[in-house]
Amino acid sequence: MKVIVLDRDGVINHDSDAYIKSAEEWIPIEGSLEAIARLNHGGYTVVIASNQSGLARGYFDIEALSLMHKKMDQLLAKVGGRIDAVFYCPHGPDDACDCRKPKPGMLLQIGQRFNVPLEEVIFIGDSVSDLKAASDAHAQAMLVRTGKGLKAEKILRAECKQKDLVSVYDDLAAAVTAILR
C-alpha cells in the first residue's frame, strides 16, 4: 500500500492566522484538489494529518469541522478524488498531548491504522512542525511554499544541516507531479 499524508491548512486549502472556522472559509488552493485526484489515480491512499487547535480554543466546534471536511469531500468528488482518512489533533499547544504536531503521534497512528512502515510514507506539509513530525516518525518529508511554507523554507535554509534533507515545491500540484514521475 502506498500512503501519502497531507497537512490540510496551507497545503490543500488556503490558511489564515485567524484560523479556518467554517466551510465558507475553507477555500482550496488552486490545483490542490486535482493533485489529490492524481494521487488517487496513481494508486496512493491519501490521508490528512492536521492540527485543529481552533477546537480547543473555541473558535469552531466539531460540527463546523465536519462541514469543512464534507465540503472538501464534495469538491474532491467533482474532480475524481477522495481523502481516505482524516486524522486531526483537537488540542491546544499547551495541552501536552502526543498527537499535536510537531510530535509524531498522528503519523504513528496513521502508520498503525494502515499497517504501513512510516519510512515508506511521504508527508507533505507547509510548516517546520510538519517537517519535525515527519522526521521524528521517520517518514519522508516534503515542503510546499503555500501557506506557511515560505517562512518554513527560510528557517530550513538558515539551518544548513537540514536544507538538503527536504524537497521543496511551489505547491501541492508541483509536489505531486514530482512524486508521480
Image (tube, grey):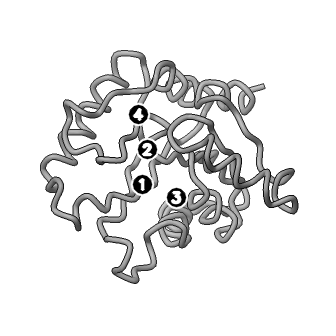
Give the percent coordinates (x, y) of residue 84.
Answer: 42, 43
Whether 158 is drawn above or below 70: the answer is below
Task: Please identify, in this view, whether the residue under mark 2 or under mark 3 is nearer the observer.
Answer: 2
Q: Farthest residue in the bottom direction?
A: 96
Q: Is residue 161 above or below residue 154?
A: below
3 vs 1, front mark? 1
Instruction: Please give the residue where the numbered disc 3 appears in the rendered image.
Output: 114
**Three-letter amino acid code at the position of disc 3:** Phe
Residue at the spot 18% in from the left edge and 55% down from the top edge: 59
Precedes in sequence: disc 3 or disc 4: 4
* Separation of marks 4 and 2 at Cα, in angstroms: 6 Å
Left or right of 42? Residue 19 is left
Q: Which mark is residue 8?
A: 2
Circle 2 residues within 10 Å: few <14, some 14–19, many ≥20? many
How far apart are the alpha carbons under marks 3 and 1?
17 Å
Residue identified by numbered label 1: 50
> Is disc 2 in contact with disc 1, using a CB cutoff of under 8 Å?
yes
Give SS at disc 3: loop
Mark 4 touching mark 2, by CB under 8 A?
A: yes
Residue 74 in picture, x, y percent from top left: 27, 26
User: Residue 13 has which mark?
Assistant: 4
Mark 1 or mark 2, which is nearer the start of the sequence?
2
For label 1, the crowd category at 10 Å Cα-Cα, with few meaning under 14, some 14 to 19 and many 20 or more, is many
| Numbered circle sitting on residue 152 | none
